[in-house]
Amino acid sequence: MKKKILLTLMLTIPIFILLILFVIGRTPFSIQAIKPIETSEHAEQKVQVPADEIKVEDNRTIVTQHSESNSLHIVGIGDSLTEGVGDPLKEGYIGIAKEELERKYSLEMAMDNYAKKGLRSDQLIKKLKKKDIAHALAEADMIFMTIGGNDMMQVFQKHFFHLNVDLFEKQSETFADNLREIMTMIRTENAEAPIFVIGLFNPYMVYFSEIVEINKVIQIWNQKTKTVLDEYSQSFFVPTDFLFSDEQESLLHEDYFHPNRQGYELMAEELISRIENELLFIP
């Protein structure tokens, strides 16, 4: 086990040595300078949509869009985090959340998960054009998504020897434009289903916590995501970065990048909490 950890660190340390080199001598940028986009020509006007309701056994009501019984259809799209890479049971946060919602509220839930490891936002746009995925989105009662991490990693890969903050900020703008297109495509197929987008976290907090700039870049990415989601109705951001900030090593898979089962369970708990806050009320 120690040898495996040592090998993993030997493979990842060179990347972060370069990160250190690119931030040395630069003026740190402040998170306070990250401001939401107030207006956008791409923004969709927020519209409150009518919804059907499903009664649950604790006398609360879960608001849904299409269901006429205690049955829900959830759809997952995006990258490896929604695919569940790192979970030995291959469920990930989406499978864990499904089982817990079924148990807690006596629901029957069907699930289609189209997430794929390594997917970037531009690739997800192409994927959403497939007829089977478009049909699943049209029939969905809730949609779960993770996207953006591989866009950020692409910056590392393309500019490995001359990284700088401007490159990450520029790519974050491109990512935001792609996310708008993704959201518009989803809303074209389904104008009503709640969309929950799970935020990024820093998987290197344990071993490289002193590199503050990594956290700041991730916060920029998350801020871009939140800004875009604010432009669309029934769209919710689910933060996860704080879940992995303490004692993170025990929450990661042996690849030291993806969550393990416990990490996904915490993500699922946060997602369910957001679902309950947004879609449940006491009559």
Image: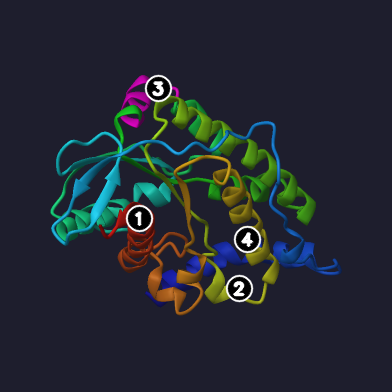
Query: Circle 1 sits on which residue?
Result: 275
- Real-space Cα distance between discs 2 and 1? 33 Å
Point out the tag, 2 or 1, that comes first from the N-terminus: 2
Identify the residue at image location x=37%, y=38%.
Answer: 193
Residue 232 inside the magenta-drawn segment:
no
Picture layout, residue 241 above or below residue 228: below
Identify the residue at image location x=18%, y=60%.
Answer: 104
Instruction: Tell me the quarter of the picture where residue 176 sits.
Output: top right
**196 or 209, which is in the foreground?**
196
Label 4 neighbourhood size at 10 Å, few (<14), some (14-19), many (20+)? Answer: some
Q: Is residue 162 visible?
A: no
Query: Circle 2 sits on which residue?
Result: 208
- Real-space Cα distance between discs 2 and 3? 40 Å
Which stretch appears magenta? Answer: 129-137
Picture layout, residue 157 above or below residue 208: above
Nearest to viewer (mark 1 / mark 3):
1
**64 or 186, which is in the foreground?**
64
- Real-space Cα distance between discs 4 and 3? 32 Å
Identify the residue at image location x=64%, y=36%.
Answer: 177
Which label number is shown at residue 94? Answer: none
Point out the tag, 2 or 3, that comes first from the N-terminus: 3
